[in-house]
Amino acid sequence: MNRIIPCMLALFLAAGLAGCDAGRDPNENLEVKTDTYPEPSEAQNKDGALHVDQRRMQEQMNKTPYTQFELEAVYSKDQTYTADIDRDDEKGNLIVTLQDDLKNKHFDGMGAFDIIYPKLKQLSLQGNEQKEAAITQVLKAFGLPSDYKEIEISLIKKDGTKIEYEDQL
């Protein structure tokens, strides 16, 4: 009997509390938030992801002997392959672009850097190579065909030395 009284009391309390909301619409005063995260503002982008990307690109470029790189290869039907890693003179930030008309692809920023950097690491150009050997090394590293109409390669080494190779077929 002693067990029945506490069980009955709990049952009556539960029924009484449930009855308090009996006439109320369950969706009333229910606020649904659809925007969990605010849209990033331009300031958030500049201070957040872009800053992190710049730092990462700078750190990786410090592992190469080059501070800047430019490759432009022109193929038939006016298709070009252009890969650029340049420095913004004012801020020192890297500006990276990749335009591959052969595969109809275009990338900017970190996306372009992630494609160009591993290829750039394969290069060992010092400026004293024969033009043909240097061009072959770049074409191989970038996986480009050798039937170009025109090619221009420009690198700036950390000591400021500029290396350039040009060829037309």
Image: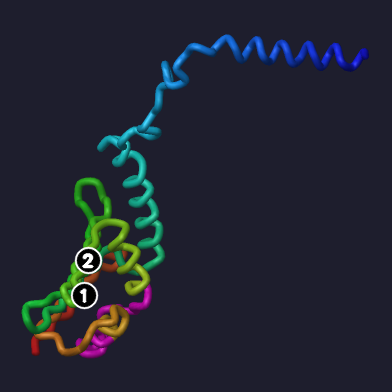
Magenta residues?
Answer: 121-136
Q: Nearer the viewer, mark 2 or mark 1?
A: 1
**To which residue does mark 2 refer?**
98
Residue 125, quarter of the rendered image? bottom left
Q: Residue at x 28, y 68 (%)?
A: 157
Classed neighbour count for the residue bearing mark 1: other residues with Cα under 10 Å, few (<14), some (14–19), many (≥20)? few
In the picture, the quarter occupied by the N terminus is: top right
The kind of secondary structure element at disc 1 is loop
Q: Tell me, yes or no, whether the two marked residues, 2 and 1, touch with CB atoms within 8 Å.
A: no
On the picture, is 99 further left or further right than 27? left
Query: Taking 66 as reference, is 56 above or below it?
Result: above
Residue 115, quarter of the rendered image? bottom left
Residue 108 locus on image (x, y percent) = 24, 58
Residue 28 locus on image (x, y percent) = 42, 17
Residue 43 locus on image (x, y percent) = 28, 35
40 drawn magenta: no
Q: Residue at x 20, y 87 (%)?
A: 131
- First in sequence, mark 2 or 1: give its number: 2
Residue 130, quarter of the rendered image? bottom left
In the picture, the quarter occupied by the C terminus is: bottom left
The kind of secondary structure element at disc 2 is strand
**To which residue does mark 1 refer?**
103
The Cα atoms of the two marked residues, 2 and 1, are separated by: 11 Å
Q: Amino acid at mark 1?
A: Lys
| Residue 128 in view in this figure | no
Q: Amino acid at mark 2?
A: Leu
